[in-house]
Amino acid sequence: MTTERDDAEPPSLAKRFGALVIDWVLCLLVSNFFGDPLRDGWPPVVVLILEYAIFIGLFAQTPGMAITRLRCVSFVDGGRIGIPRAFIRGVLLSLVVPALIMDGQRRGLHDKAAASIMTNA
């Protein structure tokens, strides 16, 4: 059985990277409120994980994804993935390496662990 997500062209890596850069800049700005991102590396990472958990879990896209017209949805039914799965995805994304190992649909290990897929909005 073939679903629409199997046939659709996955978003380009440039769009995905652009969304991540926008989100990272926002995380750097927000993390200034409770840490020094230039001195301590952990505040922006924590903010990124929380941003991904909340925004992807509830709205299927982060602010960066909204600007680049991307969505992160459930691989099974195309709906929202919820906060727990988005949290797992954010933690694995912050480790970088899982995001670099992709299949033919450009699903990284972080997407597979969260049973999610990136689509064009």
Image (cartoon, helix red, strand yellow):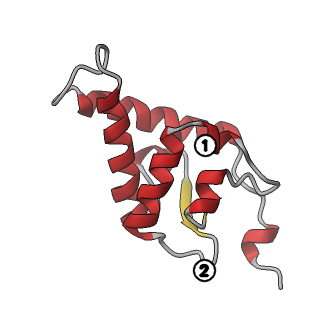
Q: Are marks 1 and 2 in contact (CB under 8 Å)?
A: no
Residue at 47% in and 71% down: 80
Marks 1 and 2, Cα distance to the nearest angstrom? 21 Å
Q: Quadrant of the N terminus?
A: bottom right
Q: Earlier in the sequence, mark 1 or mark 2?
A: 1
Direction from residue 64 to residue 104 in the image, left or right: right
Query: Does residue 23 lie above or below 2 as drawn?
Result: above
Residue at x 77%, y 65% (from the top left corner): 8
Q: Counting other residues with Cα less than 10 Å from the Cα at mark 1, is it few (<14), some (14-19), or many (20 or more)? A: some
> Measured along the vertical axis of the image, is residue 97 above or below residue 106?
above
User: Which quadrant of the view contains residue 30?
Assistant: top left
> Is residue 31 toward the left or the right of residue 51 in the image?
left
Residue at the limit of the structure toward the bottom, as seen here: 1
Res 121 seen here: no
Q: Label 2 sits on what residue type?
A: Asp
Q: Position of residue 54 (x, y in %)?
A: 33, 58
Q: Residue at x 59, y 53 (%)?
A: 110
> Could you tell me which secondary element the residue under label 2 belongs to?
loop
- Quarter of the image where the C terminus is located: bottom right
Q: Which residue is mark 1?
A: 16
Q: Position of residue 34 (x, y in %)?
A: 16, 30
User: Which structural element holds mark 1?
Assistant: helix
Dot 2: few (<14), some (14–19), or many (≥20) neighbours within 10 Å? few
Image check: 81 left or right of 3?
left
**Farthest left residue?**
33
Between 39 and 116, the residue placed more toward the observer is: 39
Which of the numbered marks, if any, corresponds to residue 77?
Answer: 2
The residue shown at (75%, 75%) is 4
Residue type at the position of mark 1: Arg
